[in-house]
Image (tube, rainbow, N blue to C red):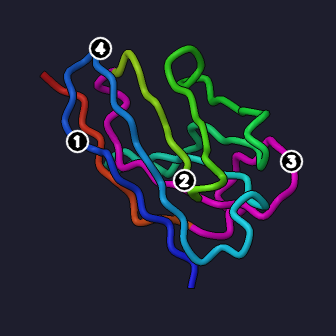
Amino acid sequence: QVQLLESGGGLVQPGGSLTLSCSASGLTYFNAYIMGWFRQAPGADREFVIALSRSGGGIDYSNSAKGRFTISRDNAKNTVTLHMNSLKPEDTAVYYCGASGATSLPRRRLDDYDYWGQGTQVTVSL
């Protein structure tokens, strides 16, 4: 059974930083999956944030993530990490980790992803 477990969410002030982690279990070969992060604000659709290629050598950024967020993976530990800097109130959302069995980026559609985590709340506020 595949499970993606996000962690690291919380409350942060505007301009602050936060690191989210996603730990995968049950994937036969973690490095066979593109890993992505999406987010969903209240009343909004789930939207693409950032994705990382299987090797970790390629990154696809949404406009909102460019210059502020980055992503990394440790294929030996089956984890992917989202580093978020210069956070804004509009970054407030539930953040979801996804695993895609596709072979190349970009993968920005929800249906590109085969597995999802349960999400972790990020709140940016004073």
- The span picked out in magenta is 88-115
Q: Residues within 10 Å of mark 4 (few under 14, many from 20)?
A: few
Relative vertical location of residue 26 with respect to residue 122 in this rendering, above or below? below
Q: Quadrant of residue 112?
A: bottom right
CA–CA distance in space, label 3 to label 4:
33 Å
Residue 105 screen position, x and y as percent: 82, 43
Task: Name the quadrant of the C terminus.
Answer: top left
The residue that mark 3 highlights is 104
Instruction: Give the residue displayed 57% in from the left and 78% down from the top.
Output: 2
The residue that mark 2 highlights is 79
State the SS at label 4: loop
| Residue ranking furthest to the front | 76
Mark 4 vs mark 2: in front:
2
The residue that mark 1 highlights is 10
Q: Is residue 107 magenta?
A: yes
Instruction: Give the residue displayed 59% in from the left and 59% down from the top.
Output: 78
Instruction: Give the residue displayed 72% in from the left and 33% down from the top.
Output: 60
Q: Amino acid at mark 1?
A: Gly
Q: Amino acid at mark 2?
A: Thr
